[in-house]
Image (tube, grey):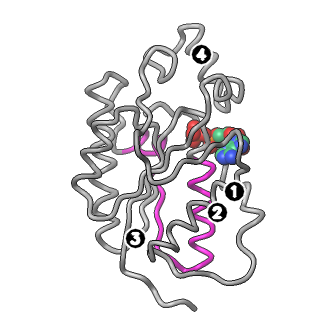
């Protein structure tokens, strides 16, 4: 059994709905658990159905929501946990604010063009946004501000799920947040863990 590391980090996955944040986050989680690392995923959907239940999708509410996620992720990361955030987090300034308040912060831009996300429409939300059943949907009526200088970019239209996951794992190893693993790296991550939740509109 590997010795437990105490250097935590926030791994902040940002991108449009359907870009691949949850899929990549769960894949990383799976790999880290296999290495006995302490890891927690803060998924935008789950946060919205729990600690941010009362919030809507105005700019103000989105900012509050993201600050809450940042606060919790900070608590986790400073206690040696790899806190993986998978949330649209559309506003650059709030992400940067959280970065400023965090000792170890890695921003991962999960990048896929709007047309691709819309074609994937994993949760049927783009269709609803287009037919005005959902208002303020990021990428349709609301803005998404892409990171200017993220530590990692996952191009989910050009790179496979495994390539994206492995890229992030390699960076975590490189920065010594997780122990290096010799031998075969993840090639077939647990599809069950990529199960989609009902709503993703942080
Ligand atoms: P998000 O959490 O960003 O809303 P999801 O992870 O829920 O996005 O959905 C992304 C969809 O795109 C999934 O159906 C996933 O299988 C697919 N996909 C295709 N290629 C990739 C990739 N390289 N990385 C992540 N997801 C991908």
Q: In the figure, is residue 103 to the left or right of 2?
A: left
Q: Quick one: label 1, few (<14), some, or many (20+) residues within 10 Å?
A: some
Q: Which residue is mark 3?
A: 81
Q: Is residue 36 magenta?
A: yes
Could you tell me how far apart the alpha carbons at marks 2 and 3 are, in whole angstroms? 19 Å
Q: Nearer the viewer, residue 57 or 143?
A: 143
Residue at 55% from the left image edge and 80% from the top image edge = 36
Task: Say if the magenta span includes residue 38.
Answer: yes
Mark 3 → mark 4, Cα distance in angstroms: 37 Å
Mark sitting on residue 163: 1
Question: How far from the left and from the top, in percent, is residue 191?
Answer: 74, 55
User: Which residue is more in the foreground, 68 or 154?
Assistant: 154
Say which residue label 4 marks: 128
Whole-number angstrom distance, CA of label 1 to CA of label 4: 31 Å
Label whose residue precedes the other's in the sequence (2 or 4): 4
| Quadrant showing the C terminus | top left
> Which quadrant holds residue 149?
top left
Element type at marker 4?
helix
The span picked out in magenta is 22-50
Residue 195 visible in image: no
Asked if the residue at tag 4 contacts the one at tag 1, i.e. Cβ–Cβ closer than 8 Å, the answer is: no
Q: Are marks 2 and 1 in contact (CB under 8 Å)?
A: yes
Residue drawn at (48%, 57%) of the image: 41
Estimate the spatial distance between the alpha carbons at disc 2 and disc 4, rounded to whole Å: 33 Å
Instruction: Choose mark 1 or mark 3, whichever is in front.
Output: 1
Residue at disc 1, CB closer than 8 Å to ligand 1: yes
Tags 2 and 4 touching, CB below 8 Å: no
For marks 2 and 3 on the same chain, the one whose residue lies earlier in the sequence: 3
Q: Secondary structure at mark 3?
A: loop
Residue 166 is tagged as 2
Describe the element under mark 1 as helix, strand or loop: helix
- Residue drawn 70% across the image and 38% down it: 157
């Amino acid at each position: 059994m590997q010795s437990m590391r105490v250097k935590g980090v926030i791994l902040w996955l940002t991108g449009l709905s359907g870009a691949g944040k949850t899929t990549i986050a769960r894949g990383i989680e799976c790999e880290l658990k296999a290495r006995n690392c302490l890891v927690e995923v803060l998924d935008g959907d789950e946060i919205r159905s729990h600690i941010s239940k009362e919030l809507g999708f105005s700019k103000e509410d989105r900012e509050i929501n993201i600050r809450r996620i940042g606060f919790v992720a900070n608590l986790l990361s400073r206690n040696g946990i790899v806190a993986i955030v998978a949330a649209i987090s559309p506003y650059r300034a709030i992400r940067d604010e959280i970065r400023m308040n965090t000792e170890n912060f890695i921003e991962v831009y999960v990048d896929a063009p709007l047309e691709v996300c819309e074609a994937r429409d994993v949760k049927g939300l783009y269709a609803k946004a287009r037919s005005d059943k959902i208002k303020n949907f990021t990428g349709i009526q609301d803005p998404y501000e892409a990171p200017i200088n993220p530590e990692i970019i996952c191009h989910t239209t050009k790179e496979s799920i495994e390539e994206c996951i492995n890229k992030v794992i390699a960076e975590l190893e490189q920065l010594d947040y997780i122990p290096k693993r010799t031998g075969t790296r993840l090639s077939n991550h647990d599809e069950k863990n990529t199960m989609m939740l009902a709503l993703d509109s942080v």
